[in-house]
Image (cartoon, rainbow, N blue to C red):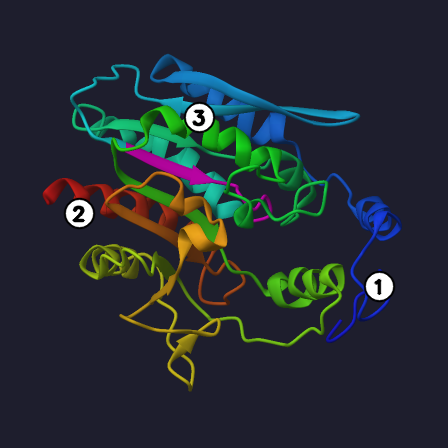
Amino acid sequence: MAGSYPIGVPGQAWGATELAAWRARQRRQRSYSEDVVSAIERLGARFEVVQYGRIEYPPDSYPLFAVRSRDWRDGLPCVLVTAGVHGYETSGVRGALLFLDREAARYVDRVNLLVAPCVSPWAYERIQRWNAQAVDPNRAFREHSQAPESAALMRLVEPLRGRFLLHIDLHETTDSDETEFRPALAARDGKPFEPGQIPDGFYLVGDSENPQLVFQSAVIEAVRRVTHIAPADARGQIIGSPVVAPGVILYPFRELGLCAGITGARYTTTTEVYPDSPRATPEQCDEAQVAAVCAAIDHALSQ
């Protein structure tokens, strides 16, 4: 698919016809209810489950759930874990659920945990990056958001702004970024597709306005015990950005409308697991996400 996409006219941004054609190509491949909602329901005995919104893409309707500490205490700092902002990034969703099931209990007396395991359920079911409107939720965390998924999460978080110690957003970088999603983006926006390079391994994206490199490096070192860390390319970059510490690059979170920029937390990061690596299993990818969450909380609390 290098340089082309089967929808639209090169050089022309999509209109309603192209959007409808793109949406018609999307097929439900897995169940949000069976995979995610059922797992959240099982956690209800140990945590408080809150519905913070509903996404309507007729005929589909998706309740949005977050899981929070049952013993919520105003004197404790808040920790936000988000996943499934890009629905196709599976280890983020599974890693968030695994963290809740296996590791969260050891933190609930020290922090108020708030976990949104699957922010974009329509995309989760279709193994897609965008929502049904061909909008990337992870570029839409801004005022008057075009993505209802992003707007709902911002409404959930807003009453707690200023109280967050940490926000970690769980993502993946996949081969399909290069074969499907970036060509689709170029076609949607009427721009030429410029091929890139997918890094082999785990890396982090920190905030260029608040890098916290000691924190980022602590997370990298914890994940290194689970899976390999992406090296810099020949230009000293990962996905076109300079490597500022082993396995760490920086983006301006708020300027780009990224999820990890919504809390104003002291510590923020975005994980990037590489599930297509021949050196990593799906289980390792899930474990890498869990290791990253635990290391992030541990470091934040140690400071």
Instruction: Confirm or deny contact between disc 1 and disc 3 (CB under 8 A).
Output: no
Nearest to N terminus: mark 1 or mark 3: 1
Viewer-proximal residue, 135 or 63? Answer: 135
Instruction: Residue at 57% x, 44% y: name it.
Output: 137
Q: Quadrant of the C terminus?
A: top left
60 sits left or right of 168 in the view = right
191 sits left or right of 32 in the view = right
Nearest to N terminus: mark 3 or mark 2: 3
Residue hosting label 3: 156
187 sits left or right of 113 in the view = right
Q: Residue pushed farthest left?
A: 303
Which disc is residue 277 wearing?
Answer: none
Instruction: Residue at 31% x, 57% y: name it.
Output: 209
Nearest to N terminus: mark 2 or mark 1: 1
Q: Position of residue 61 (x, y in %)?
A: 69, 23
Residue hosting label 2: 299
Viewer-proximal residue, 197 or 205? Answer: 205
Instruction: Residue at 26% x, 17% y: name it.
Output: 72
> From this viewpoint, is residue 119 visible?
no
Q: Position of residue 147 (x, y in %)?
A: 61, 39
Which range is magenta?
A: 79-89
Residue 160 against residue 254 in the figure, above or below? above
Residue hosting label 1: 6
**Label 2 residue SS:** helix
